[in-house]
Image: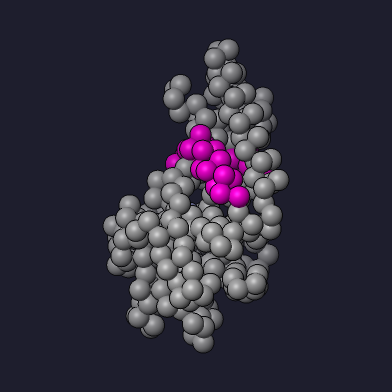
Amino acid sequence: MIAATPYGEVLQIRMSRYPDFPSAMWVCAYLVDGLLIDTGMAHTTREFTEFLKDKYVKLAVNTHFHEDHISANKFLQESRGIEIFAPPLAVEKISKPAKLYPYQEEIWGYPVPSVVKPLGDHIYSDNYRFEVIPAPGHERDQICLWEKTNGWLFTSDLYVSTRPVACRSMDDMWQILADLENIRALNPRVLFPAPTHVVYEPAAKLDELIAYLEELGGKIVEFYQKGKSVERIKEEIFGHEDMFAQATQEQFSSLNMVKSFLKDCL
Ligand SMILES: [Zn+2]
């Protein structure tokens, strides 16, 4: 299922396998001034490529190598000859078959490998310059794109909500916090996230999220220093894991969040 919504000059193209999937299981690509930011998931590749048929797309960027950001690459290259760039750390991974957990296969599907070019520290569309902002907390290769004159920040998977309670084992929560402080300092006017709604004037939400993560991380470290086990800390702060942990083969869990904040202690 595909739904497109214009936000001024930026077109959000939201994809999900089923229409009733909640946000966080969607993925959004953005099209602005001929620049396509991310190419979506395998399950919607055909629909997405068809949707873009009559749109002006000059080039594309993958914000990181995850399967829900790269899947139409090959199709867009073959049908439209579009040049695609990705962060240097992602280029090799995108060129090889992905290894997915069953939940990833169910929600997003396997991407077809593709050959993309390494992205430098900025990229131009016809009228705008987008600065590449590294955001390695969610995944080491992840980047955001920052268009200063309009205050547009394309945040990929860095921003999901103001109160996350679970993460993957690969997520580095202290680095995510540093990434958020970094983008907050840019003072963006609009956030264009991949997994959720567009956020106008995001300062208050970013401040709330940063304060929440600082407090949470501090509390987790303090509990650990008092001799509490990882499992006990998880129970005291978050209680039982929710259905999402079960549905994702425990890949998204509160236990992972505790472990991530304790990465320098364990
Ligand atoms: Zn991701």
Looking at the image, the residue that sits furthest to the front is 149
Judging depth in this view, the residue of 170 and 148 nearest the camera is: 148
Across and down, in percent, residue 19 comes to 65, 68
Q: Residue at x 52, y 61 (%)?
A: 147
Quadrant of the drawing holding the N terminus: bottom right
Q: Quadrant of residue 8?
A: bottom right
Q: Residue at x 55, y 22 (%)?
A: 221
Judging depth in this view, the residue of 121 and 166 nearest the camera is: 121
Across and down, in percent, residue 33 comes to 51, 75
Q: Residue at x 54, y 81 (%)?
A: 51
Q: Is residue 98 above or below residue 127?
A: above
Classify residue 113 as left or right of residue 17: left
What are the residue bounds of the magenta stretch? 162-187
Quadrant of the drawing holding the C terminus: top left
Magenta stretch containing residue 258, yes or no? no
Q: Residue at x 57, y 44 (%)?
A: 185
